[in-house]
Amino acid sequence: MALLQISEPGQSADPHRRRRAVGIDLGTTNSLVAAVRSGAVDTLPDHQGRHLLPSVVHYAARDEVTVGWSAKADAARDPVNTLVSVKRYMGRGQEEVFSLGSTALYALAPSAGGMPRFRTAAGDITPVEASAEILRCLVARAEDALGGRIDGAVITVPAYFDDAQRQATKDAATLAGIKVLRLLNEPTAAAVAYGLDQGSSGVVAVYDLGGGTFDISIMRLSRGVFEVLATGGDSALGGDDFDRALAEWLRTQAALPDALTPEEQRGLMDTACAAKEALSASDSVAVNVNGWCGQLNREQMYAVVDSLIDKTLQACKRTLRDAGVGLEDILDVVMVGGSTRMPRVREKVEGFFQRQPRVTIDPDRVVAMGAALQADVLVGNKPGDELLLLDVIPLSLGVETMGGLTEKIIHRNTTIPVAKAQDFTTYRDGQTAMAIHVVQGERELVDDCRSLARFELKGIPPMVAGAAKVRVTYQVDADGLLSVTAREEGSGVQARIEVKPSYGLGDDEISAMLEDSFAHAKDDLQVRALRERQVDADRLLVDLDSALAQDGATLLSEQEYHRLRKAMADLENARARCTDHRELARQVESLAQASEQFASLRMDNAVRKALAGHRLEEFDKEV
Amino acid sequence: MDVSSDYYRIFNLPEDYQIDGELLQQRYREIQRECHPDRYVGKSAHQQRVAVQYAAAINQAYTVLRSPVQRALYLLERMGVRTDNENATVNDMDFLARQIELRERLHSAVETTDSLKELEALSDEVAREFAQLQTLFAGQHRERDVQSATRTMAQMQFFSKLLDQLQDAIDAQDA
């Protein structure tokens, strides 16, 4: 009897099959998905030919969730159950959501200071869950267009997103069942889409003003390498704020009361947005607000929005300085984000950089396209491709010290990945535990920074004050996500956490949500978890097998070689008979550890290989 | 791995304070092409973890070698000097007087409005002196004159900080 080959997610049965990878721009106002097909990159349209998907989710009732255009149409009619611009609330706490405005529209469920939950007809919904709905919708569109399951996605985030906001984005992808190849900064994605590295090398500025966020990135480009020098911005400033300022102006003009119903508020915002867009094409526009009829001209709008645009230019100035480059060094300026359609924004940016900005690619679509190009490379469709993105963290990472002060461990604009350690000691005799409070931000006082996580290192052997040496290590990976380890060096007592932001979802919450969604899909979480661990095991075995074939003989002693082969055989055994996903995970980890040294040796080799050809002349010079 | 300890060896450059910035940058990119986690996306979680550690170590080495002050600190550490000692210049009366003078000039320029020209002139002066100190340090390091090099490094730290403060003041007036 012939056996059917089962293809696991992320591991194709046919190694030569082109993998399906997409780039997703999860935007405040609109979201998009793009892919590389027959060598060309483009955003993927829906059945009606529309590329944009409004980032709007309507929760009419349980199991009655709509996303996109139809949800947007419901916003004015049913504002309380229609979540818009949820990206603004990603990774934020309940109190912050109030201060961000527009929450008058929603009812918030009471919460103990954690992640905000919007009260809807479908139950209490977190911004992460709403974002997952949007992601699911985009993935479905992509699977339809590409004719099969997606192997992985690059999801873009504003460069200025902090750790909590990035983690929330990744959690949303996990909930939507997407394998995240990389979180990519939006300005970097745009630069990739423009292919600016292919021309003469030099420094470029990417000005990205979206619906709810503003980013400015300064990067140095040369064939295939995008090295971000500095990034700055405001993760709560965008076109939405222009609309809100205009709505406020209209409210005053029309002499409306301060307190509006959610419907009126939504209507006013829509009017303001429409007027703003109309003024891109004409000098003056007629507005009708609750029976009040008036005219709004460009000059009046400038008076309202200019201060917001100036705020972005101030950020540009600071970021240029952080990058250590002057205006005269800037070779090109790229405009990204729907809000850069406003002629006033273009005018002011051109005035600032004294250079006509590039606008040839649709500013709404350029980010998703860049993400798709990187996804195509990451997933291995373009072997030998030279694309390399070296990004930075936007905000310093620190730890709270005595007196509520922040001690920075990793400074902003440090290239990622990065790992840094700092030593601390106990201040009381016999102290056996140490509280570690992880914060992000530039300010001196902890209270002025964003609290990312708190954890405790326990079990320090009692010693006199100052005798213990606690090494706290911060590691930021290529997605810009932080993990923290603390270890007492004398005793080896260790604590490790993936930073789960104070305002984020716990792992158990994510599992619960997943379980919930699987209950709907009649899938079994246990079975799925086991299958995922089996894929992990297979991947590790395949990796090691080819690594050993390549370098085993040259880098390992015969004894080491056989020990590793034996450990691999053990895992193969476990893979075949193990039915508990936790046990299999342990076995995978055990082989990973056994092969640690071999992996390091291979990396050393890779470094040497990269420099091959330079060695001789250099050593000659040294002697 | 030797990657985390010997920054010059990673980039295969001679251990000297004077460094070829272009070459350093070029080699940094070549190495990251091999080690960056982006090259290991399809591999096992373990292989990805190792790549993150390597890429981080290489970024660290690159950051230190690129910075005039951090590079000097690193070379001193390699010669066994504890560089967390902030008193290195305390007994240097001439330098102390120079510090006070420069700080006062910065201060009075910040107090006056429209002193952009003054600030820029001062900044140029400080930058020149900072460059001279770097040349001095390079010589002292080559001769393994630990004591002099330590003193020079402390002066470099002061000038580097002062340059930052001057830039802050210039930005404030420019705004």
Image (cartoon, coloured by chain):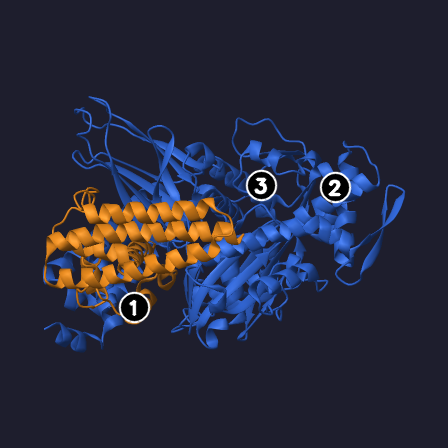
**Disc 1 target residue:** B21
Q: Position of residue B123 (x, y in %)?
A: 38, 57
Q: Amino acid at mark 3?
A: Tyr
Question: Can you tell which chain is drawn blue?
Answer: A
- Tell me the shade of chain B: orange
Asked whether A572 or B79 is in front, the reply is: B79
Do the dots labelled 2 and 1 sit on one chain? no
| Towards the viewer: A367 or B150 | B150
Taking the image as shown, residue A186 lies to the left or right of residue A610, namely: right
Residue B45 in percent (x, y) is at 34, 53
Given the image, on which type of amino acid does mark 2 rest? Glu
On the same chain: label 3 and label 2? yes
Q: Which residue is mark 2?
A: A248
Q: Which mark is residue A89?
A: 3
Q: Quadrant of residue A390?
A: bottom left
Q: Is A401 on the left or on the right of A62, as rendered? A: left
Q: Which amino acid type is marked by label 1?
A: Gly
Residue A348 appears in the rendering = yes
Identify the element where label 1 is drawn. Answer: helix
Check disc 2 and report its element: helix, strand or loop. helix
